[in-house]
Image (tube, rainbow, N blue to C red):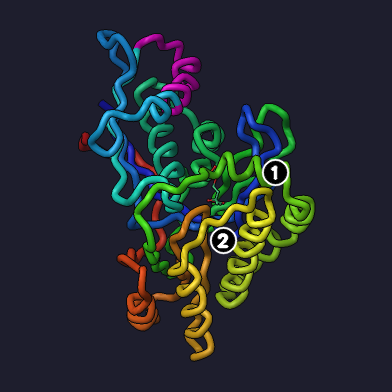
Amino acid sequence: MVTAKAHSNFALIKYWGKREEVLNLPAVGSISITLQEIFTISSLMFDKSLAQDMIEINGKAASPQEAQRVSSFIDLFRRLGKITAAVKVISRNNFPTGAGLASSASAFASLALAANQAANLNLTSSKLSELARMGSGSAARSIFGGFVEMKIGKRSDGSDSIAVPIAGKEFWDMHVLIAITSEKQKEIGSTVGMKMTAATSPYYPQWINTNQSDLKEMRHAIQNKDFEKLGELSELSCLKMHAVALSANPGLIYWNSATIDCMHAIRNLRKQNIPVYFTIDAGPQVKAICLKGDIPVIQAELKKIRGVKRIISSALGPDASILEDQL
Ligand code: PMV
């Protein structure tokens, strides 16, 4: 068995929309941070004695839909390694699955690393990022730690639609507090949500048109360690993504009332000169981006909000890696 660990990430400049669906090519670039405290560990082996793939996620047999998604992903590696054997996969997240905490990002990145080693492929990190992208767009970014940019790419084979590291986790001591407002699975996943948005939102072309300048400004903010700029751009990209999703038909509402209360609480903290900014993905959890020294006061404010069930506190995390111990 080969075991790999990949950390989840979330985007400061959001990915929402695909330019091609089979290879899962993004219509926009994105910039993310990888998180220390939320991750997936996956153990995997190819086994000729198995009649079919055996996939266990979070201690239970995978649903037919999940199993199909994982098997198709492993097929990419079977093809490259000319392997015909079935696979045994045991995968575990240390956080709720499918609720806007990017479980697919860390899951597919960990599977990519483990499958690469189990199939003796010796692929580069860039190639693993390309393959991880086919599991889920955000998974391409979880191959790397710290600050990461996902390139849109131009080629039709997707070989340049890959993530590249911008700066390691040591570069900047940034922190994230994640307010969990619901542990339920979301109703509309990102793939369907993106498709509905692209097909029906009158604002979608504008969302695409403003992406390049958002990316450029965010790269500068990171390079110059300009926290205020980074935070403002993150909130803007988040609100733009939700605005375009809300304007799909029917509109996509990923928030609950606690999500909105957290957004206001974060803006109120800023009025008290505490630098903290929010971002939210395709789910109801709120990620507060802050600097280390301000964690206690922000945590105390978020805890007061009705509907905030718990708070995960995380520093920036490392590259995905192979572990010695099995699950
Ligand atoms: O990786 P996917 O296909 O689940 O899409 C992720 C989309 C967002 O989380 C909403 C934004 C992002 O850039 O991570």
Q: Is residue 21 above or below residue 75?
A: below
Residue located 32% across and 17% down the image: 46
Q: Is residue 28 magenta?
A: no
65 w.r.t. 223: above or below: above
Residue 19 screen position, x and y as percent: 70, 38
Residue 98: x and y in percent read 41, 46
Q: Earlier in the sequence, mark 1 or mark 2?
A: 2
Q: Secondary structure at mark 1?
A: loop
Q: Look at the numbered disc 2 and give the secondary structure of its residue.
A: strand
Mark 2 sits on what residue? 12
255 vs 142: above or below = below
* For residue 42, side relative to residue 149 (left or right): left
Q: Whole-percent x and y of residue 23?
A: 62, 29
Residue for point 58% across, 77% down: 228
Residue under the point 61% across and 34% down: 24
Residues in magenta, as a range: 69-85
Residue type, mark 2 in image? Leu
- 327 on left or right of 256: left
Say whether mark 1 is within 8 Å of ligand 1: no
